[in-house]
Image (spheres, rainbow, N blue to C red):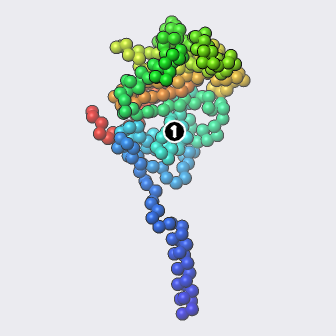
Amino acid sequence: MTRHIALTLLLASLLSMAACAQPAGQKPVALTQTNEQGCTRQRSLGPQDPYADPAPLKEACIGPYLLALPQNYFYNQIGTEHDGSYMLALEYPSLQAFKPGERMNLTADMSIRTVSVEYRYIDRIDIREAMRRSYTPMAYQQGNPEASLESRIQGERLHGLVPYYLDMGVVRTHYRAQGFKEGAPVMTAGFHKDWFLAKDAAGEVETVIKCTPREITVSGVEYREGKLVKSKENGYAVCTQTFMIAPMKTLVEVTYPREGLERWREIDARARELLTGAIKQSRGVKK
């Protein structure tokens, strides 16, 4: 009898502890996540292993499109962030994914050979208008010479692109009038970008690339044992390439070492291939 009472008290105590561990009304963790456009993805719950090889597939959404990619293609190498946001990371110059877990110890050398790929679904304005905003000044930028094509120096075609170089004389005059001192960062070329544009057959801008300006002659990188690494030079020259995938209402932004500018078409094709090749399904998209 005494033993029965002791067991009963022990059971009551354990149940009380369990109740404390799981507060009343606490919701279970959702296994899926749905975005504004109705795309539902499976969430990755619990401990994640970025070193898993072969890398497991992880789901992500871009607008109404559900994607599935090996997790080592993601910037963090484990999938999307908790809110569903994500970026992809490729290795330059191969434009292939890093090995599983390779980016867990992110060194300067690895950072400079990272090609980051970001997709943005545009549904609040026309996708072409969003593209135009990448090379035309916004209202608050009116009069700013670095924000418009007209204030730049148009150069000879390069790698199939039309360059619009920074005119530092005009830029410095503008900022002096704004009260900036000669030693301010905005008075140096490295603070700004050269632009390179490509147009389609109809004459509409389809690609905008903004790079560390030509005044900065050092690349900041070198090859060592076949790998692109940081050199001893100060700084690092980069390009950011923006283009649209109009049928998917998607803007794509890719950042890579400036030496990759001549490969812009290949980079464009690779970013498109990653997106379209990863689509599992689409919700409410007209064919």
Q: Residue at x 45, y 39 (%)?
A: 69
- Which residue in the protein does label 1 denote? 74
User: Which quadrant of the view contains residue 107?
Assistant: top right
Looking at this rendering, what residue extends furthest in the right direction? 232
In the rendered view of the protein, which quadrant contains the N terminus? bottom right
Q: Residue at x 33, y 39 (%)?
A: 282
The reply to whether residue 279 is in sight is yes
Q: Is residue 103 above or below residue 17?
A: above
Q: Quadrant of residue 20?
A: bottom right
Residue 217 location in percent, x, y?
65, 14
Q: Nearer the viewer, residue 242 or 134?
A: 134
SS at badge 1: loop
Residue extending furthest toward the top: 156
Residue 13 on image: x %, y %: 55, 78
Count of numbered marks: 1
Amino acid at the residue labelled 1: Phe
Q: Is residue 56 visible?
A: no
Quadrant holding the C terminus: top left
Decide: few, some or many residues near mark 1? Use Cα within 10 Å; few <14, some 14-19, many ≥20.
Answer: many
Tell me the quarter of the picture where residue 275 sits.
top left
Which of 40/134 is in front? 134
In percent of width and height, residue 233 lies at 71, 21
Q: Position of residue 249 (x, y in %)?
A: 37, 30
On screen, residue 152 above or below 191: above
Q: Nearer the viewer, residue 103 or 193?
A: 193
Q: Is residue 250 above or below residue 192?
A: below
- Give me the residue at 49% from left, 15% from top: 148
Point 53% across, 17% down: residue = 144
Above or below residue 257? Residue 21 is below
Q: Residue reaching furthest bottom?
A: 1
